[in-house]
Image: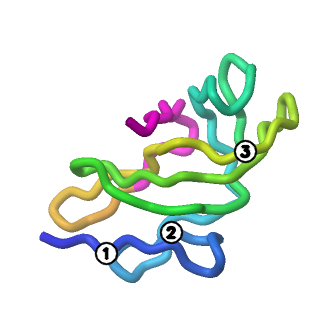
Amino acid sequence: MTTRLRVLDDGAWISVNDAREVRVSELWRLDAPDLCECTLTDLVVENFQTVGVDGSTVEARVYGQCIACGETGITDWVPIGRVRGGEFTELDRGAVRRVRREA
């Protein structure tokens, strides 16, 4: 089954199968040591750069700012949800998301 993924509105939304599913202005907790020196990064998502899929996991590269230290930047691949049976399920917003480095 094919899943259509797109970044919409100049990076403000991620569309999954033509439905707006994930938006900017969310606060995500990341394990992202390459983004800032905080043990865990509390990232305000400001812009989606690109979206992709790794197996059943939908991922995005995100521009944002850590609210603890103020560092800004673009992440490597951050999981945002899963597609199972053609249905998208967003990750729990309170979960710690482990950033996957590009090989």
* Three-letter amino acid code of the residue under disc 1: Arg
- Say which residue appears at 74% left-offset and 21% top-offset: 38
* Three-letter amino acid code of the residue under disc 3: Gly
Magenta region: 90-103
Sequence-earlier tag: 1 or 3: 1
Give left or right: position of 1 versus 91: left
* Quadrant for the N terminus in the image: bottom left
Q: Is residue 16 above or below residue 61?
A: below
Main secondary structure of the magenta stretch: loop
**What is the CA distance from the residue labelled 2 to the residue labelled 1?**
10 Å
Q: Which mark is residue 93?
A: none
- Say which residue appears at 27% left-offset and 58% top-offset: 83
Q: Position of residue 26 (x, y in %)?
A: 67, 53
* Three-letter amino acid code of the residue under disc 2: Ile
Foreground: disc 3 or disc 2: 3
Q: Which residue is mark 1?
A: 4
Q: Is residue 98 magenta?
A: yes
- Say which residue appears at 24% left-offset and 51% top-offset: 56
Q: Marks 3 and 2: CB-CB under 8 Å?
A: no
Q: Marks 2 and 1: CB-CB under 8 Å?
A: no
Q: Which residue is mark 3?
A: 73
Q: Which residue is mark 2?
A: 14
Name the one closer to the observer, 22 or 98.
Answer: 98
**What is the CA distance from the residue labelled 1 to the residue labelled 3?**
26 Å
Q: Position of residue 14 (x, y in %)?
A: 50, 69
Sequence-earlier tag: 3 or 2: 2
